[in-house]
Image (tube, helix red, strand yellow):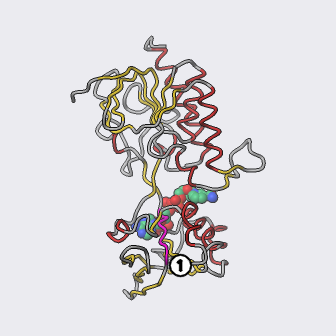
Amino acid sequence: MSTEISEKINCLIIGSGPAGYTAAIYASRANLKPVLYQGIQPGGQLTITTEVENYPGYPEGVQGPEMMVDFEKQAQRMGTDIRYGLATKVDFSSQPLKVQIDEEKWVEANSVIIATGASAKWLGLDSEQRLNGYGVSACAVCDGFFFKGKEAAIVGAGDTAAEEALYLSKICSQVHMIVRRGEMRASKVMQERVLKAENIKVYWNSETEEIVGEKKVEAVKIKNNQTGAITEVPVSAFFVAIGHQPNSDIFKGFIDTDEAGYIKTIPGSSKTNIEGVFAAGDVQDKIYRQAVTSAGSGCMAALDAERYLGEKGLH
Ligand code: NDP
């Protein structure tokens, strides 16, 4: 791979969720002179949530976007060089490590902390792609407001789907929830809330056949898996809440991942299979996926990077 290097970085952090910013705070305080590229969604997934009540240190709770601004400010105050930009390619075949930014320039790094998080999954329907942004969305909290007083459909049966269905039930006149099996994966308490809500109708054993509409969502065709019957339900919005996938594509071929794409780290550490490359947050965690666990793993990555650079005589 031919790469003209434009800059040399001691500790490069990719991603700006709780993992990336926490790694940045620790790496800055350890004088690793970190550079952090924020990625496509500065602040990460918490910027598309509302209230966070389970992050310690905020006794009254905090809005997700506000919390991420706090994280950024703290990293900045410690001296992190925070930049807009997306890592688009890597070459980890030799040291120093090489990372391409915005499909243009290549930077060289003595250590890399991958904190690229995870993104929403889609069903993969043509109509879903065509109407994305025109009534199709993967974030009820971001877009539900636009469909105030209207009918909406949501697909999924995990805690996210349950939470978003409840959120929508407070804004929309009616919520149609499409569940592919005869039961939900969501926690008992969330399921109970969904089933109790008067304006949420659950379609069990059902899948989305098609989202109907030329320029905007007008209806959804719901197919019952057991009978094969298709029902067309008029809706103005269609929300997808079927889980997330780790943002690890650009590292494939270099960094070991599991079948789902989550980066494998050596248990009890943030180390990947490549020397000097560490992973933190949702890109390597399919179990806990919490802001606080992400932040904790970001701290681990910075400490691991510091130790590594020290051992290599680079710090
Ligand atoms: P999950 O992976 O838990 O659930 C995904 C859901 O989408 C499942 O019900 C799955 O169905 C369904 N699904 C997947 N693919 C399709 C498809 N192609 N068509 C139709 N349905 C599909 O993801 P979540 O985002 O809900 O949750 C992720 C993690 O975050 C979980 O551990 C969850 O507990 C946690 N979480 C916790 C919250 C809280 O505590 N307040 C809030 C939100 C999330 P099936 O069940 O049939 O596989």
Q: Which of the 4 quarters of the picture holds residue 164?
A: bottom right
How far across and how far down the image is residue 192, in percent? 66, 73
Q: Is residue 106 left or right of residue 158?
A: left
Query: Which residue is disc 1 drawn over?
Result: 176
39 vs 275, nearest the viewer: 39
Q: How many marks?
A: 1
Above or below residue 312? Residue 98 is below
214 vs 60, nearest the viewer: 214
Q: Secondary structure at mark 1?
A: strand
The boundaries of the magenta stretch are: 236-242
Please identify the quadrant where the N terminus is shown: top left
Q: Is residue 193 left or right of residue 15?
A: right
Outermost residue toward the right? 59
Q: Residues within 10 Å of mark 1 (few under 14, many from 20)?
A: many
Residue 240 belongs to magenta span: yes
Residue 276 belongs to magenta span: no
Which residue is drawn at the image coordinates 65% and 39% (left, top)? Answer: 70
How far across and how far down the image is residue 27, in percent? 55, 24
Above or below residue 137? Residue 88 is above
Above or below residue 101? Residue 178 is below
Which residue is drawn at the image coordinates 58% and 34% (left, top)? Answer: 22
237 vs 199, nearest the viewer: 237
Which residue is drawn at the image coordinates 39% and 69% (left, top)? Answer: 131
Give the residue type that dot 1 points to: His
Above or below residue 85? Residue 192 is below
How far across and how far down the image is residue 229, in percent? 39, 88
Outermost residue toward the left? 2
Q: Is residue 5 left or right of residue 158?
A: left
